[in-house]
Amino acid sequence: MILARNTPTWLYLAKRSQPTATSKGRVIAFRRAYHDESFGFRRPRQFTMPDYTPAELRNRAVNAPLLRYADALRTHGHRAASIDPLDLLRRERVPALEPERYGLPDPNAVYDTSGILWTGRESESNTQWALRDITEFLNAVYVGRIAYEYMDLPSRTERLWFAHLLESQSSTSMLHCNAERKQRIHQLIACSEVLDTFLQAKFPNLKRYGLEGGESMLPALDALIGEAARAGITRVVLAMPHRGRLNLLTGLLGYDPAALFYKIKGGAEWSVQGGQFAGDVLSHLVASPTLNYDGKEIKVSLLPNPSHLEAVNPVALGKARAKQYTLLKALEKGGKGAEGCMLGDKVMCVQLHGDASFTGQGIVMETLGLSNLPHYTSGGSVHIVVNNNIGYTTPASSARSSLYCSDVAKMINCPVLHVNGDYPEDVVRAVEIAFKYRNYFRKDVVIDLLVYRRWGHNELDEPSFTQPLMYQKIRARRSVPALYEDKLVNEGTLEEDTAASVRASCKATLTDALAASASYSPPLIKLEGQWNATQIDNNDVKMVWPGSPEAQTFDTGVDAEVLREVGSASVSVPDGFEIHPRLQRHVKSRLAALEKGEGIDWATAEAMAFGSLMLGGCDVRIAGQDVGRGTFSHRHAMLVDQKTEGVIVPLNHALSRATGKLELANSSLSEEAVLGFEYGASWERPDFLPIWEAQFGDFFNGAQVIIDTFISSAETKWAKQSGIVLLLPHGLDGAGPEHSSSRIERMLQLTNDAYSPQPNTNVNMHVVYPTTPAQYFHLLRRQLKRNYRKPLVVAAPKGLLRLAAASSRLVDMLPGTKFHPVIPDNAPTNTAKRVILMSGKLYYDLVKERTARNLDEHVAIIRIEELAPFPFSELTDVLKLYTSNGTKRVEWMWVQEEPKNQGAWGHVKDRLEVVLRALVGDGNVVYVGRREDAVPAPGVGETYRAQQKAVMDGAFSGL
Ligand SMILES: Cc1ncc(C[n+]2csc(CCOP(=O)(O)OP(=O)(O)O)c2C)c(N)n1
C-alpha cells in the first residue's frame, strides 16, 4: 500500500492489517458474490486491524482514565476546534476535553501511552509521557484547524486507522509540504482572486458566483487530483455547482479565458453541426483536460449539470462506475485480466457541494445511499462541501437541523474532516488525509471546507439586507490569498516581488484573453474517443449526431438459431443449482415457446434482445427495484439457489460466446439517484444499453428532475447523447390512483416532437407504448443498432406480460423484421365504418369487445406504437386505405382508457388532425375515454369497472 511507504507507523499498520474475506460471514459473501463480482468488478480489499498486544491491553486497563481522556479528545475535539473562519459556529466550552474530569489532575504525572496513543515513536520505546505533553499532543492533533469525526465509525479498523495516521503524523503542516507546494497554493488562490477582480471590473453586471472567501477550494482540488494521480488513478469524474466554477475552470482545468469572455459576451460555448444546440449558462460550463502531476497523467472530466443543485451527484457516480468498467473491459480484451484492478483503482468520483444544498436536497441522501452498494459503488467518492454557512440568504441556523452541514453523510458511516478554509495548507493536509482514507478503504469521505462568501449569493445581490452582522465581519477581513501571501512572505517562502509578479502575470493573461475573445470562434464539437466509433454486433460503426443526415437505424432482426440459442441460455440452470420449484414452469414454457416459434412472451423477447446484443459485444444493464426477478415476477433473469441463496444470471454463464455482459442491478428504494446513476452510465460509451425500470410507472415522478434536466434536454443543452431506456409500467387495471399510470402525457409534453411532418425528425427522446413482445424486442435492439443514441421512454406492460394474445412469434424477430411505429388492422378496410386510433394495452380489450359485439367487419383498430416522434407518414399510409378520392369513408375515433387530461390524447389530437386534414380535408376526431380527472384512476373497484365499461361502450356505440 502506498501509505505504508510513508512512515514507519504505516509500515507497521500495513503489516498488521491482513486482508479478510468479509466481515459478514461466508453465506452472505456467497450471496453477494454475483452482485460484487459477476459484472467484471473486483471487490476492494478488506482489512482488519489486529488486536492490541497483551502488553498494550494490560496498559489500557491499568491506565483506563488516560484511555478515556484520549478517546474523549478523539471523539469531541471537533467541538472545540478552530474550524470556522468567521467564528460563527456556536462553540461551547467542552468539559469532555479536560483531563481533570477523568481523574488526571497532575500535568506532571507520567503515564505509559502504549496501546493508548499512536505517537509514531513506539519503536523508540519512548512511551512514558507526562500528562502535560499528552494534553498538548492531543490538542495539537484534534483541536486545531482540522477537526475529525471518525470515532463514530462502526469499523474498528477504520477508527484505528485514523488514530494511527493522525497521531503519528501530528505535524500541523501538510504531509508533503515544501516551498514549491506552498508557491503553487499561492499561485492558485492569488490567480483566483485576480480573476474575480478582473471579471468584476470588466463585467460589473455579471453573475459569476465568484470564489472570494472560498479560494482554498482550488488548492483542495489540486491536492486531491495530484494525490490521486500519484496513487495511479487516471480518471477523475468531477461534479460541482456554480460557486467558483469559473475559477476552477480557468485556474486548474485549463479553460481558455478567451472562450469564457466570448461566452460572457453572449457567444456560444460550442459550435455544432446538424444539431439543435441551445447551449447553457456560464455557470454550467465544462472542461475535460488531462493534467500532469509528477509525470503522471490524469484526465479530469467536469460534468455538465443543471441548476438543480446536487442533481448531478448520481450522474457522476454512474459515470465513474461505468468508466471503471470500460477500463476493466479494455484490460480483459487486451488479454491482461483484470485481477489487479479493484474498484476505484483507476477512476475516482469527486463531488463538490454547497452547504445549504448538501443538507437540503434529498438526492444527496439517496446518492450517498448508493455509495457502498453492490452494482453502485465506484470505489469511494471524495466529497468537498464548500461551506460558506449560507445559502442564498438562508443562514445555517435556518438551513439545517444538524450542527454540521455534513451530518447527512453520517448515515453511511462516512468520516468527516472539517477544515478552516482560511488556512490553505491545513486544507491541503485535510484533503490528503481524506484521499488516503478513500484509497485505503474505497469508501466515501467528506471534507467540510469552512469558508465565507465575500459578496451576496451572486455579485449583484446585497447580502447585508439579511446578514448585516455577518457581512460586517466579512468586510473587515483581508482576503484569503492576501493573508496567505503575507504568511509566505513572512516565513521567507515567497518574495514580495514574486507574489506581485504572479498576480501581474495572471492579469496580463486575462487582459490578452479579453482582447482575443473579440476574434474567438467556438470550436466545433466533435464525437471523441469511444463516441467517435464503436462496435455494434461486432461491426465497426462510425457514430454521428442524431440530427445528421447520416443518422440511421440498422436491421434489428436476428437469425432464428441465434434467438433460440439465446432464449434457451436465458433459462439454463447449471448442474447442482437448485431453482425454486415454481420456476420449473417458467423454464419449460420458455423452451416450449422457442421450440414452437410462437407464444413468445415479453420476458423471453427481452432476454433475446439482451442476449443477442451481448453476442454482438454490447453490455446491458438493467437497474431498478427488484429488477432481477421483476416486479411482476416475470423476468427471472437472475436465479437464486434455494439451498445457498447463491445467484446466477443465466445469460452471463450459459451464453458462453457472448463478449458482452448483463448486469441486473437490484437497486435501493430510490428513483431519483438510481435513474441519475443509470443516466450517468449512459454517457460513458455507445456500446452499452442502460435501462432503468420503475417499479410502477408513476414512481418516475420522484426522478422528474433527472428527466427534465438531463434526459430530455442534455442533447440540446450540452450536445450529449444517451441511449438510456426508461421502462415505466403503465395501464389501468384497477390498481388505484398510484399504480396505474406512468403519466405518459408528461413524457410526451417533454418531447420537442413536431406538430406537423418534418423532413428530418430529431426528437429529443422517443416515447413508445408497444403492444407486442416483438415490438419491444426491436425497440431494445434499436437503441444500440443505430449510429447515434437517443433516450427511449417505454410505457411498459403489466397485465400483458402473461396475456397469450399479447405474445409474439419468432418470425416477427427475424432479419428483415423491425419495430413498427403504427400497426394497421388486418380486417378488410372497405367494410369499416369506424377507425379507432389508439395506443397501448387497451388494444386487447377493444379487440375482444369488438368480436363480442360482432363488429369485426365494421371497426378497424389501429395502434400507434410510437407516440414521439409522431409517425405522420406511417399513419397517413394506413389511414389512406379508409378514404377514397380524398373523402372519408369512416368515422375517426381516438380511444384511450386514461382521463382526457392524461394519456396520449393531448399529444395526438393536433397531430391526428394534421394527418386527417391532409387526407380528407377534415381533421375531426371523436374522443372516447375517461373524462378529465385529478387522478389517473379511481381507487374504488366498482367505479373503475363502470368507467372501463363506459369507455368500451363509447368505442362501439352507434354501430
Ligand atoms: C434545487 C434547487 N433549489 C433552489 C435553487 C436556487 N439556488 C441557487 S443557489 C442557492 C443557494 C445555494 O446555497 P449553497 O448550497 O450553500 O451554495 P452557495 O451558493 O452558498 O455556494 C439556491 C437556493 C437551485 N439552484 N436548485
Image (spheres, rainbow, N blue to C red):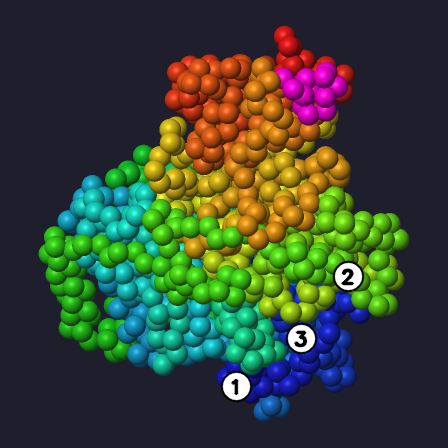
Splitting the image into 4 quarters, where does residue 181 fall? bottom left
**Residue on which the image places disc 1:** 5
Q: Do the residues labelled 1 and 2 touch (CB within 8 Å)?
A: no
**Residue on which the image places disc 2:** 572
Q: Is residue 581 left or right of residue 146?
A: right
Mark 2 vs mark 3, CA separation in Å: 37 Å
Q: Helix, strand or loop at disc 1?
A: helix
Q: Nearer the viewer, residue 220 or 807?
A: 807
Number of the front mark, 2 or 3? 2
> Is residue 662 shown to the viewer in this render?
yes
Mark 1 vs mark 2, CA separation in Å: 49 Å
Label of residue 47 in the image: 3
Q: Which amino acid does label 1 sit on?
A: Arg
Q: Helix, strand or loop at disc 3?
A: strand
Image: magenta residue range: 846-858
Mark 2, Cα crowd under 10 Å, few <14 / some 14-19 / many 20+, is some
Inspect the magenta stretch and tell me whether residue 362 lies in it.
no
Q: Which amino acid does label 2 sit on?
A: Ser
Q: Helix, strand or loop at disc 2?
A: loop
Q: How many marks?
A: 3
Query: Quick check: is the Cβ at mark 2 less than 8 Å away from ligand 1?
Result: no
Residue 246, x across and y down, in percent: 29, 54
Residue 251, x across and y down, in percent: 28, 63
Considering only vertical position in the picture, is 844 above or below 155? Answer: above
> Is residue 133 shown to the viewer in this render?
no
Q: Which of 947 and 64 is in front in this view?
A: 947
* Residue at point 57%, 23% (across, down): 829
Q: In this view, does 659 lie to the left or right of 172?
A: right
Mark 1 vs mark 3, CA separation in Å: 17 Å
